[in-house]
Structure formats: C-alpha cells, structure tokens
Image (tube, helix red, strand yellow):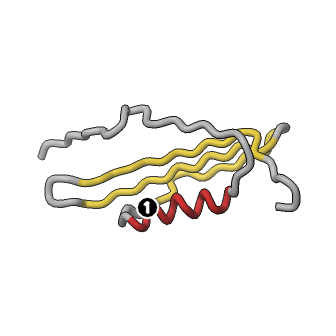
C-alpha cells in the first residue's frame, strides 16, 4: 500500500486573524456542526484554556476524517488559537 498525502492548502494551512467581539460557544458549536454535516467526526484532539494576566488563552484542535473508497480518505484538521480573550458586558 502506498501512503501518500495530497494537500489542498499549504502544509502550514490557512491563517485567519480577527480582533473583536464574538460568541465563543457559537463558534465552537458551528465548527463541530460543520464537521458532522460532512460526516467527518469531529474529534477534539486538544482543548486547553489558560488564565493569563491579560485574558484567557484558548487552543482547540479538531480532527475529522471520512473514508471515500478503498483508496482515498478525507482528513481535515482545524486549530483555533485565541489570546487575550475576555468576557464583554454581561455575557
């Protein structure tokens, strides 16, 4: 059997930066729902929250995979890193 990977993005992936207010629980649930709707799992590989002086540092890594046929399998990793995360208002 030949073990060969073909990447749809670069091996380092895609970086999206955002600064502002967002709904953390909704983001987390939407990502998990996206994986489930495509029958990719998901599996949460890592979920860490660290309290820091300027807010929380959160890291979540999702893995998902689905066999296509005897020769191919889809595999996706999503890693979310957040720094200086704080609650706004009464949330």
Q: Residue furthest left?
A: 1
**Crowd tier of the residue under label 1, counting other residues whose Cα lies within 10 Å: few below 14, some 14–19, many 20 or above:** some
Q: Nearer the viewer, residue 73 or 37?
A: 37
Q: How many numbered dots are placed on residues in this image?
A: 1
**Which one is nearer the viewer's eye here, 24 or 69?**
24
Examine the image and state in which quarter residue 68 appears: bottom left
Query: Residue visible at 19% across and 42% down?
Result: 3
Residue located at (70% from left, 49% from top): 49
Q: Residue furthest right?
A: 89
In which quadrant of the rendered image does the C terminus lie?
bottom right
Q: In the rendered image of this protein, does residue 53 appear above or below residue 31?
A: above
The residue positioned 25% from the left and 54% from the top of the image is 73
Q: Residue 85: where, in percent of width, then height? A: 75, 45
- Residue 12 on image: x %, y %: 43, 32
Q: Left or right: where does residue 54 sit relative to residue 83? A: right
- Which residue is labeled 1 in the image? 35
Left or right of 67, for residue 33: right
Please provide percent x and percent y for residue 86: 80, 48
Numbered disc 1: secondary structure: helix
- Residue 75 in percent (x, y) is at 34, 51
Q: Residue at x 25, y 60 (%)?
A: 67
Depth check, front residue: 50 or 26: 26
91 relative to 50 in the view: left or right: right
Question: Relative to 89, is 39 on the left or the right?
Answer: left
Q: Quadrant of residue 7?
A: top left
């Amino acid at each position: 059997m030949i073990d060969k990977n073909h990447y749809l993005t670069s091996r380092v992936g895609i970086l999206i930066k955002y600064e502002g207010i967002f709904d953390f629980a909704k983001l987390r649930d939407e990502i998990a729902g996206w994986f489930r709707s495509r029958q990719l799992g998901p599996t949460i590989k890592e979920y860490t929250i660290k309290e820091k002086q300027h807010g929380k540092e959160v890291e979540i890594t999702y893995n998902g995979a689905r066999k296509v046929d005897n020769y191919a399998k889809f595999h996706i990793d999503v890693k979310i890193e957040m720094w200086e995360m704080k609650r706004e208002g009464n949330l």
